[in-house]
Image (cartoon, rainbow, N blue to C red):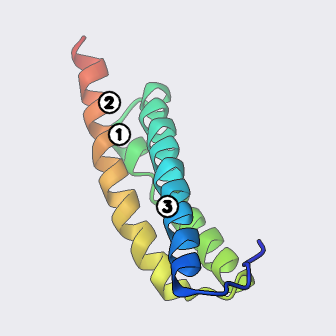
Amino acid sequence: MEVNNCQSLEEVRSHIDQLDDQIVELIAARNGYVKQAANFKHSLEEIKANERMEAVMDRVRSRAMEFGVSPNLLTKLYSIMIDAMVEAEISEFRNAKSL
């Protein structure tokens, strides 16, 4: 990923705003896939999938280091995101089972 050399604070902020828009869009897409995953699972234990969560966190930490970003920062962000998405997936799972 290339970071442009900006000539002003406004230009820096503009790039940050564009990235924030992309990040929100990507998180929304991720959330959509997480909700779909509920259709393929048969129990709440499968949804919580601790081994999968650990694998995701390990991969994220590794990618963070590749890009020179704090692995601790990304681990915290992903923990919050995964916890919220697991709750959404559980809700989706329960709704599907009640139909």
For disc 1, the marked residue is 89
Q: Quadrant of the C terminus?
A: top left
Please count the marks in the image. Answer: 3
Which image quadrant for residue 31? top left
| Numbered badge on residue 93 | 2
Say which amino acid is labelled 3.
Answer: Met
Q: Position of residue 40 (x, y in %)?
A: 50, 28
Query: Among all residues in the image, which is located at the extreme right?
Result: 2
The residue that appears at 28% across and 47% down in the rendered structure is: 87
In whole angstroms, how far apart are the C-alphas of marks 1 and 2? 6 Å
The residue that appears at 38% across and 61% down in the rendered structure is: 81
CB-based contact (under 8 Å), mark 2 and mark 3: no
Nearest the viewer among 13 and 50 is 13
Q: Residues within 10 Å of mark 2 (few under 14, many from 20)?
A: many
Is tag 2's residue or tag 3's residue first in the polypeptide sequence?
Answer: 3
Residue 95 in the figure: left or right of residue 22? left
Q: Nearer the viewer, mark 1 or mark 3?
A: 1
In whole angstroms, how far apart are the C-alphas of marks 1 and 3? 14 Å
- 31 over 72 or under it: above or below: above
For disc 3, the marked residue is 53
The residue that appears at 50% across and 48% down in the rendered structure is: 25
Residue 88 in the figure: left or right of residue 2? left
The residue that appears at 73% across and 78% down in the rendered structure is: 4
